[in-house]
Image (cartoon, helix red, strand yellow):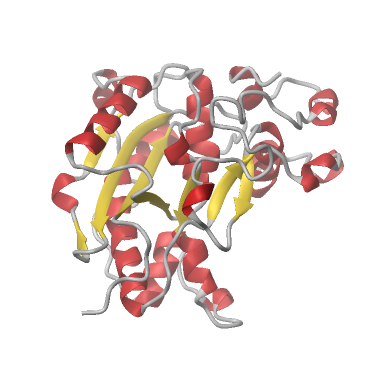
Amino acid sequence: MTSYNCPFDHLLILDFETTSGGENRDYPTEIIQFSVVPLDVKAKTILEGIAFNKFVRPVINPILSAHCAELTGIKQGTLNTADTFLVVYKQFLEWLLKNGFQERKFAIVCDSRQDMWRIAQYQFRLVRETMPSMFRQWINIRRTFDDGLEDGQKEKLVGTTNIEKMSNYLGVELSGKAHDALSDCVNIAAITQKILEIGCPVTINEMLCCSAIWRKKPIDMTLHANWKTDFQLAHNIFHLVLPLTIKVVRNYTPSMYGVCSYCKKPPTVCGAVHKQPPREFYASLTEPCVFAKTAGYY
């Protein structure tokens, strides 16, 4: 039996659901569902039976917006009795220990960069805790998938989400409900397993770092006037506001684990202070940036 082309013992497929302001992108998102489904690389098995799935009580905006409730299907009553983020994160660490998942021997897998770069980084900032090493590098399975496509195939993908596009192309049948974090994890796990079965290499391909050359250029706000209601424009703003940005990794080695490629400092130092604060952006605002202000970025 041919082994999977993956250097890790386990892949932990992770997905978050968060609070949202609907069309308003300038919103202090908080994690409200934290789910992980393991994939045993050596046994070639998805371990759905020991999945981690916890709801998280938001603090800044404890009442879900109608848009968020409809999108996720999460009930207000469920969140009212849930633990807050740091309690759930501690439960996650205990779950890792209980199941023998050791740092450096597992890798986090997500269907995009959003979960680690934006959602987790922002959540840890809100609770004034250091972004942990295990969340500073991950496998963006959509990037892995795209790397295996031939020229012109990407434009022909069918679906509205990364999960739909990858599953349709790979012939993976989806289960559960979209925007339920646990269901999304199960589906991403099936997609990841299919990619491994094809023989594609699956390893860490994105990391966080504290500096990027492109961030030194002032942003043209005339092109970003509608950033608060436009996903892609907001995405550009968040890249400026968040202290840690994304570095694409082509040849990951274990020595890179948890270490910023720019400053070479440990997580307790890297990202604690924004090395490239977007002062021009803040100065251009006629009203506060709620996303940045709530987190204390300025």
Which quadrant would the C terminus be assigned to in this image? Answer: top right
Q: Where on the picture, by quarter, is residue 31?
A: top left
**Horizontal placement of 171 versus 283: left or right?**
left
Q: Measuring from the top left, give residue 16's x and y in whole percent.
A: 39, 40
Q: Position of residue 246 (x, y in %)?
A: 62, 47
The vertical placement of 270 against 225, above or below, is above
The one nearer the camera, 274 or 104, is: 104
Instruction: Name which residue lies at 41% across and 76% down.
Output: 169
Provide residue 105's location: percent of width, then percent of height: 33, 50
User: Is 114 on the left or on the right of 85, as rendered?
Assistant: right
Q: Is residue 22 visible?
A: no
Residue at position x 42%, y 17% in the image: 59
Residue 79 appears in which quarter of the rendering? top left
Residue that appears at 28% across and 32% down: 92
**Left or right placement of residue 114 versus residue 177 in this view:** right
Residue 130, image x and y in percent? Answer: 50, 25
| Quarter the N terminus occupies | bottom left
Residue 233 or 45: which is nearer the viewer? Answer: 45
* Vertical side of 244 occupied by 114: above or below: below
Residue 273 visible in image: yes
